[in-house]
Image (cartoon, rainbow, N blue to C red):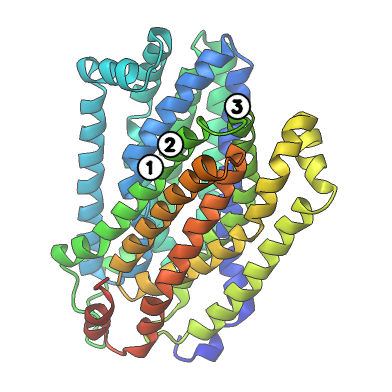
Amino acid sequence: MTDGSELTQRRIFRLWVPLAATWLMMSVEGPFLAAVIARLAEPKINLAAYGVAFAFALLLESPIILIMSASTALVEDAVSLRKLRNFTYALNTIITVLMVICLIPALFYPAAEGVVGLPRNVAVLTHHAAILLVPWPAAIGYRRFHQGILIRNRLTRRVAYGTVWRLAAMGSTSLLLALLTPLHGALVGAAALSAGVTSEAVVIGWMARSSVRRLTLTQPSQESLHAPLTYRAVWEFYYPLAITSMLTMGVNPLVTLFMAHSRLPIASLAVLPVINALVFAFRSMGLAFQDVAIALIGPKREGYQPLKRYAMVLGVCVVLGLAAIAFTPLLGVWFHDISGLSEALTHVARVPVAVLTFMPGFSVLLAFQHAMLVSARVTRPITWATLIEVTGILLGLFAGIQGLDLVGATAAASALMLGRIGAVIYLFPPMLRTRATDSGGSRAAAINSP
């Protein structure tokens, strides 16, 4: 791409749609497995064990999640391919070894029972389920590394095809184990999740093979704005993203802890996952946009204006879409008729959903900001923004629950909005500076300081 005018809104849309479909399909995975587990023996215990095992694996997996954005931004020739691939495999190995160490019974059970407070029977099921999830983080890292290559090469449909394969493998594994084996529900869910993600990783790697082969024959360009990639450069680029993921994953348990001490705690804990699922369906549109923007921005950032226009339209659309539910009778239909909440719980959900109406729009804006910074190989401001967001969430929770005595779900929604607003405000100056500098080295030097 040599001219920003060549990047049309139609072209952005065609690359974005498969990734948006991917995020929506992945949002179905959790409710599906929960529904399977809920229909097996001792559903309450098994759902609890599966939930804790999943949270444990997700927290350990968090450092590798953003490797897809790194791959999209960095892998452009044989040298960068080799360096980032080796980095990914090393990080996968470290995470897997750490997970195995944490699952040593002498370490796991004191933490599960003494720190988390799980009953012995739930702790045992959680331990066994977590063992089945050991392949999961490495499979995620391998998959997301190759997904980034596909996105960079404008092959986003293949990413969506991989997700279809994942859901099919996960669904068939869970149903076969549930119907043909005596396994506990928590083990069925964990085994199905591992099978789905691992099979998707294999399929994505296979679909990316031609792009990888082409990259192995591509030598670094003399016209590149960036110096040849080194392991130190990879580390300096990626560690802020890893910290960002860990902070983002770690804030959810804190929100739950605060809500447990709020007004209407049980009702708040019951409705928040349903609220989050609804809001996430609209937020995922922004998450899908981030890597598309990284891939399309262009070496001289010539795609900035078309991507900005697309982000503005997308942000308005997702806000209006959620508002059409939050402020109309559709809210009752979704929460009461479809999600199965009681009238009382549906009433509790009304105010938090209204508060979160603009969250999908801010997610699109944040994705655009992240994309501009990652494509410029400037990642430290993203970590500082996440720290601001987490701090805002915690302060908002404390003020809403301890100071204003709000219903827990309302306090949580308000705190999430406060944190997100703080993050996007902080990122505006460094994002705008990526356009004010015209060389990779000076850009990084100018922006990477907080």
Against 370, is 121 above or below?
above
Looking at the image, tell me whether mark 2 or mark 3 is earlier in sequence order: 2
Amino acid tagged 2: Pro
Against 239, is 109 above or below?
above
Q: Say whether marks 1 and 2 touch (CB < 8 Å).
A: yes
Question: How many residues crowd mark 2 within 10 Å: few (<14), some (14–19), many (20+)?
Answer: few
Against 11, is 361 above or below?
above
In the image: residue 217, left or right of residue 190: left
| Cα separation between marks 1 and 3 | 21 Å
Q: Nearer the viewer, residue 170 or 405?
A: 405
Mark 1 — residue? 250
Q: Is residue 89 visible?
A: yes
Residue at left 58%, top 40%?
Answer: 405
Q: Dot 3: what SS?
A: helix
Task: State the image coordinates of residue 276 (x, y, percent, origin top left).
Answer: 60, 44
Q: Dot 2: what SS?
A: helix
Residue at left 52%, top 62%?
Answer: 156
Q: Which quarter of the picture shows residue 423?
A: bottom left
| Cα separation between marks 2 and 3 | 15 Å
Q: In the image, which disc is placed on residue 253?
A: 2
Q: Which quarter of the picture shows residue 137?
A: top left
Q: In the image, which disc is placed on residue 393?
A: none
Mark 3 — residue? 266
